[in-house]
Image (cartoon, rainbow, N blue to C red):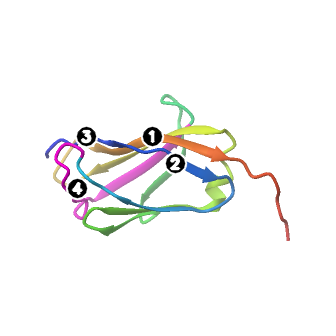
Amino acid sequence: MESIRPGVSNIDLIQGEDYIETITLIDQLTGDPFDISTADKIVLEIKEDLRSKSVIKLTLGNGLTIIGTNELKLLIHNSLTLKLSRQKYLYDILFGLETSTNPQYLIKGQINVINSISRITP
C-alpha cells in the first residue's frame, strides 16, 4: 500500500450536542483524492492523551460512514459528547484494507470541547 501523509485537523464541538461532519480526504503528498471506498476498517479514537485509553471509539457503521470514494461522514452522538468533560482531547482516524497489515493514519488532531452552560431537562 502506498504511504500517505496524514492530515491534521482540529475539531471544535459543543458538549452534549451531536457533532456531524463530512471529511473529504486528499493525499497531502500528491494532492489527489484518497480512495477509501474499499477500506474494510476505519477507526476514530478520542483520548485524553497519547498514553490513555480511548474515551470514545467510532468504527464503520458505528459513527463513521463512507459516503464517496474519498469522503467520510463522522457522527459523534450527543450522548458521547456529553461524556467529554475536559476542554481538550486528542484524536486520530486510522484505516486499513483487507490486503494490508499496516493501518495508516488519515487524520489526527485535537478536539476542543465547549462545555454546555445551561441544561434543559424535560
Instruction: Tell whether 67 sits left or right of 4.
Output: right
Disc 3 from disc 4: Cα separation: 11 Å
The residue singled out by tag 3 in the image is: 5
Disc 2 from disc 3: Cα separation: 19 Å
Instruction: Tell whether 12 sits left or right of 95.
Output: right
Q: Position of residue 51 (x, y in %)?
A: 49, 28
Local secondary structure at mark 3 = loop
**Image: magenta residue range:** 28-47
Q: Earlier in the sequence, mark 2 or mark 1?
A: 2
Q: Earlier in the sequence, mark 3 or mark 1?
A: 3
Local secondary structure at mark 4 = loop
Front-most of residues 9 and 90: 9
Front-most of residues 12 and 95: 12
**Residue type at the position of mark 2:** Ile
Disc 2 from disc 4: Cα separation: 21 Å
Furthest residue to the front? Answer: 31
Q: Residue drawn 48% across and 30% down?
A: 50
Q: Earlier in the sequence, mark 3 or mark 4?
A: 3
Disc 3 from disc 1: Cα separation: 13 Å
Determine contact: label 3, label 4, CB under 8 Å.
no
Determine contact: label 2, label 1, CB under 8 Å.
yes
Q: In the picture shown, does residue 104 fall above or below 80?
A: above
Local secondary structure at mark 2 = strand
Q: Residue drawn 43% across and 50% down?
A: 44
Per the rendering, the mark at residue 109 is 1
The residue singled out by tag 4 in the image is: 34
